[in-house]
Amino acid sequence: MSLLSRRQFHRVAASAAVAGLSPLAALAQAPVKIRASVVPIIDTAALHAAIQKGFFAAEGLEVDLTPTAGGAVGLPALAAGQVQVAFSNIVSTALGAAQGLGFKIIAPAANAPDAPPEGTALVAARGKGFKTGKDLEGKRVAVNNRSNVIWLYSRAWVEATGGDPSRVTYVEVPFPQMTDAIKGGQVDAGVLVDPFLSTGIDSGALELVGWPFHSVQKGMSISQYVATESFIKSNPKTIDAFVRGLDKGIDWMNSNAGSPEWVKLIASFTKLPEDRLKKLHVAPFKKTVDPRSVDASLALMRKHGMLTGPLASKDLLHVAAR
């Protein structure tokens, strides 16, 4: 820990005086700072709730955020130690773990419901009439990142509905720009997530093509929070505090779903107007990751040539995520 400047010390002393503490006691209670990479989508709402509602602070943590375009983008920063926690998807995390980067899942982020509607869907401009994977052959489909969970499961959906995924061109487009790319004809279809999915459908600009996650693997664990094994071993109390704070954020999201305060919180990090979020459908957040779901995703990765070797859920899940 670096030494405090004179000015910083006096600030601590002033705060301590108000609280009736000595400066050294105030320093002893200073929060542990960690940085997390996130994507501004509904999957990360419980994390934002834990920050905004003070649940992390109550656990002695100060969590700062670094926004990224996709879960795969945050993992190199995690491996380099630039962030201590990364929001990511099961496919990107597994790929990194298979490369020996020591990634461990510490908590869940989002899961697909057992039945639609869900927060991720393949969509197209209204009137296109795409219904099957066969319809998408020769077409351009937007995904936020290639070789991630959305890319893999959209390929699996194309195959499951009669198409050849090798005949579909996948184009990387960030979620906030994807609706405009579809409307403008830069791509023929795209895989969108909430809240951008619901607002695009409700606006009348987009129509549903299919549900990649539900159609391929019902109830799957889509995204999680990840740390490195070395950080977990060196900072077990910090990881435990993060999970406890996140659990409180999950409880808050589930208990307040649809309320004005819930809408306001989601608008704060997605930057979408509150009136466009009032009809948002969100599956309940869970506090554990299902190992069977992880193993099913790993099996799909092997089928599509993304993974070799014996990697299994037991290798990926930290005890806090089970």
Image (cartoon, rainbow, N blue to C red):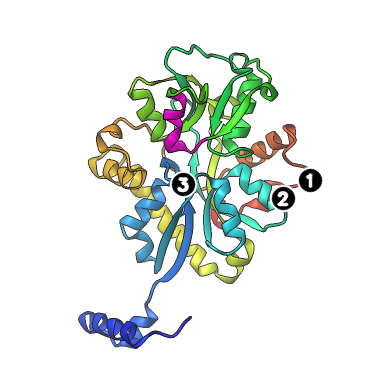
Which residue position is annotated with label 1? 309
Graded by Cα atoms within 10 Å as few (under 14), some (14 to 19) or many (20 or more), the crowding at tag 1 reads few
Q: Report if residue 62 is visible in the image.
A: yes
Image spot of residue 134 (x, y percent): 63, 14
Res 57 → quadrant:
bottom left
Q: Is residue 250 above or below residue 146?
A: below
Q: Is residue 227 visible?
A: no
| 124 w.r.t. 260: above or below | above
Hey, what amino acid is under mark 2?
Answer: Ala
Tell me, yes or no, whether the highlighted magenta stretch contains residue 178: yes
- Which residues lie in the magenta part? 173-182
User: Image point 35% across, 47% down: which residue?
Assistant: 269
Disc on the earlier residue, 2 or 1: 2
Mark 1 or mark 3: which comes first in sequence?
Answer: 3
Q: Position of residue 123 (x, y in %)?
A: 48, 23
Q: Secondary structure at mark 1?
A: loop
Tell me if label 2 and label 1 are in contact, CB under 8 Å: yes
Residue at x-position 47% and y-position 31% = 192
- Label 3 amino acid? Val
Q: Which residue is mark 3?
A: 39
Asked if residue 230 is among those painted magenta in the image, a careful observer would answer no
Q: Position of residue 183 (x, y in %)?
A: 42, 23
